[in-house]
Amino acid sequence: MTPTITATGALAHSLRDGDGDATTYDVTVIGAGVVGTAVARELARYRLRTALIDGSDDIGNGTSKANTAILHTGFDAVPGSLEARLVRDGQRRLAAYAVATGIPVERVGALLVAWDEEQLAALPALAAKAERNDYHAARIIDADELRAREPHLGPGALGALEIPDESIICPWTTPLAYATQAVRAGVHLHLNCRVRQIDSGQDVHTLITTRGPLSTRYLINVAGLYADELDRQLGHDAFTVTPRRGQLIVFDKLARDLVDHILLPVPTEAGKGVLVAPTVFGNVLLGPTAEELDDKTATGSSADGLALLREKGRRILPGLLEEEVTAVYAGMRAATGHEDYRIRAYPDQRYVAVGGIRSTGLTASMAIAAYVTELLAGTGLDLGAPAELPPLTMPQLGEAFPRPYLRAELIAADPAYGTLVCHCERVSAGEIRDALTSTIPARSKDGLRRRTRAGGGRCQGFYCGAAVRALIEEARP
Amino acid sequence: MTRRERTVDVLVVGAGPAGLGAGAELAASGAGHVEILEREQAAGGIPRHCFHGGFGAGRIGGGAIGPVYAQQCVAAAVRAGATLRTSVTVTGWAGPRTLDITGPTGLERITARAVVLATGARERPRSARLVPGTRPPGVYTTGELQQAVHLFRQRIGTRAVVIGHEPVSHAAADTLRVAGLDVVALVTDQPPSPLPAVPVRPRHRTPLLTDATITGLTGRERLTGVALRHRDGRTTTLRCDTVVFTGDWIPDHELARRGGATLDPGTRGPAYDASYRTRATGVFAVGNLLHAVESAGTAAAEGRAVAAPVLRHLAADPWPTGRPALAVDAPLEWIAPNLVALDGSRPLNGRFTLRTGRRLLRPFLVVGQDGRVLHRERLLLPAVPNRSFRLRGDWLDRVDPHGGTVRITVH
Ligand SMILES: Cc1cc2nc3c(=O)[nH]c(=O)nc-3n(C[C@H](O)[C@H](O)[C@H](O)COP(=O)(O)OP(=O)(O)OC[C@H]3O[C@@H](n4cnc5c(N)ncnc54)[C@H](O)[C@@H]3O)c2cc1C
Ligand SMILES: Cc1cc2nc3c(=O)[nH]c(=O)nc-3n(C[C@H](O)[C@H](O)[C@H](O)COP(=O)(O)OP(=O)(O)OC[C@H]3O[C@@H](n4cnc5c(N)ncnc54)[C@H](O)[C@@H]3O)c2cc1C
């Protein structure tokens, strides 16, 4: 089956193209972030006509592209909450899925570092909370052990709570893997397709999109920051998303030796605070900030935000500030004022709302998808028996595993894998070609960067920018 | 993992003017098998995409255009008998003088009796300068811009702002004009200078905004403007769809650092002495990797000059240890070379190269070690940021080889 992926033209036309004379989808998932793609993948296991639509020109282009990329254990979730349950379950599912598909994951472990007596005194309660969240490996370590484990830590650290299973993961390969599997199994993906209005009738919803109307019997709203607005279109007033911006600084790979664990602050009233963490690409992250805003599009960075991060970072890992900065970015958490996800089914409307997937959605994505599918079945849709999805292998972007440029057999079979285009990230012509012709091909420089890392390194295009753009232009039909 | 293992006498990493100069001179002077490795598909380094004159001899007004100069450097190295290979990337170290290589023909591991690093320098991109705001398309460095315009003939935009006021900034402005853009302004955070840092080009009267720091970029689908704050607190936004971050150099020091060649805190290139010896035994460094950034002619001259010390090393000259470092006090930014050779070798043309962060009118430089004054020198011309000035090197004999850091201060 050739996957149906469209980015231009009227939707009605696309639907007929792919599926003969069918004009109505069984289920439509609005939002192709990490959660929406996970839901689409889960639905792809059933004999349903499913559509996944997104307003952007790529999957994973919203909050999902800009987070701290940690696969959480959920040790510090609110015990008993839906989030706690789905994070715990999602962590297990995604860890296994990552191994099966080649999504880079490294179990580096986290240290919640106490910088004063008060924070030190808070550690036992946090350890107890971890227990209540069914996480049993947390352990308090003293200042000496902490220093032995993290020799570059700034002066004054008094001890830490160790969470050995906190992991780092590739935030871009994850939704791409979900979406790839979904469309290969027959889910239609429609990009550049923003839902403006929803008209709900007796049996079908008509979505008025920027690419014309689309009709669907069932509807799943996974629109991230905009989930509240769509929810209101369906007549609800269940939650309001107030974006909470998180700015981050990515430091050069040469800084990677400074840190071995995810270094978390002891959480306070003000939130989880600023962390220092390695990335699977071999960089070091510093961030995020937590800023309540009212503009959902304000994903820029600010001078104040960056100054604050540098001040915090200097305390945690003084040597980090001496290293070069590779990138700065900001993401928006979908905060709702509630300390939990806002997932709810409305059976009489054949509708499931997936809102308030705050700061753990990457980790919980697969568990949310399973939960949503259960809710959907509860609304009366006969799903039928699930099928196994064909296995999938994703391009390997992680630094802890051999990348193509290190694989003799691959280069012998295809010299393009030995021809480097992006020097800082060591991305080969072969990988770029593959990303431009893959199931869900890259359409832009950013899309290509997320699929291959090309252009995302320390020179930010000084060497390869023009060459990479030329390759994208060549691939355009 | 299967890697073809080989040995050579000298391995040169990087085929810009410096690496090619080194390869040419080494091969010509009988260093044995000299191999130059270049990761780009074409050798020549930065000049390949500098489509303006001034390369090589007679820098101002004279000399060749970049690509011609690059070709001359390539031809000289090949003629001299160096092996030049392109599309091969040195990806790391497997031993003190053993390098791992990736290329379309596979993986290699090459051990050399001496390694010469000539990996050049780049401009710091917008992110490294921590310029806040959105992340729209339309943001360049000069390196990317020149390649886009001259090598790939890509469309750039319509109105551009250039950040920086050094020679390369003007090269960027020229490239933008060639590509048909209006250059709205050059912006620098430096104060206005009575003495132009760059020879004035009366052909183009692009406004130069001095004393202005860039506070943010705006735009989403495309850059829409560059926000500035002037020293007096005024803020403005320059409307543009293209911005080029120029200058603000950083040596490409990854290999040097991973190979144990400690960096000089000022230049951020490997610390080195007048014989181009880094702190890693058998590893030499030349060109912009040492000091970002000098002219191509200087880089090439350093390349040629490394041949003699490399030959001495191949003839079993011991690697020096315990060389005193040279360091500068603010407002000076760096000095190169920055280790004292102890074998009497002198820097290129007998002079050290320095940079200042602030304009200095006829500065009086004092060289001291452990409280002892080694040398005093009054410069006849002002020293200005982003432009090198020189300091005589004839006081090197007075350095105590067992003493502390040699400091250069301005009085
Ligand atoms: C700074 C920061 C750090 C984080 N760190 C972590 C972490 O370490 N670990 C972790 O597990 N989680 C983390 N998260 C949380 C995680 O990133 C999010 O929970 C997750 O990305 C949410 O995914 P989503 O699919 O719900 O939303 P999104 O990725 O925002 O996807 C929603 C999609 O809906 C589309 N859309 C919206 N409205 C419409 C419409 N009307 N029509 C069509 N399409 C529409 C958008 O284009 C978008 O693609 C972090 C978040 C932030 C901001
Ligand atoms: C935009 C710009 C404009 C300039 N204009 C002028 C001018 O008008 N006149 C003038 O005299 N000078 C000019 N210069 C300076 C001049 O170009 C440099 O001084 C000169 O190119 C430096 O030579 P180099 O050999 O040290 O470095 P480069 O020319 O940068 O060469 C370094 C080479 O090393 C290669 N390399 C790096 N790492 C590896 C690796 N791991 N494996 C393999 N190969 C590697 C790179 O691909 C590159 O080809 C300009 C520089 C720039 C950036």
Image (tube, coloured by chain):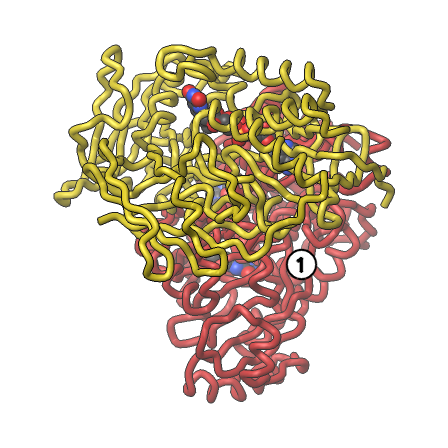
B349 above or below A293? Answer: above
Rendered-image quadrant of the C terminus of chain A: top right
Which chain is represented by yellow in the image?
A: B
For the residue pair B195 and B391, the one nearer the viewer reads as B391
For the residue pair A215 and A313, the one nearer the viewer reads as A313
Residue lying at the far left of the rendered structure: B232
For the residue pair B17 and B216, the one nearer the viewer reads as B17
Whether residue B128 can be seen here: yes
Rendered-image quadrant of the N terminus of chain A: top right
Q: Which residue is mark 1?
A: A366
Q: Amino acid at mark 1?
A: Met
Which chain is represented by red in the image?
A: A
In the image, taking residue A50 as reference, residue B410 lies left or right, namely left
Which residue is drawn at the image coordinates 29% and 37% (left, top)?
B385
Residue A236 at x, y = what percent?
Answer: 43, 57
Which residue is drawn at the image coordinates 37% and 57% (left, top)?
B369
Tell me the subunit letter for badge 1: A
Residue B309 at x, y = what percent?
Answer: 61, 37
Residue B121 at x, y = what percent?
Answer: 50, 35
Residue A16 at x, y = what percent?
Answer: 67, 27
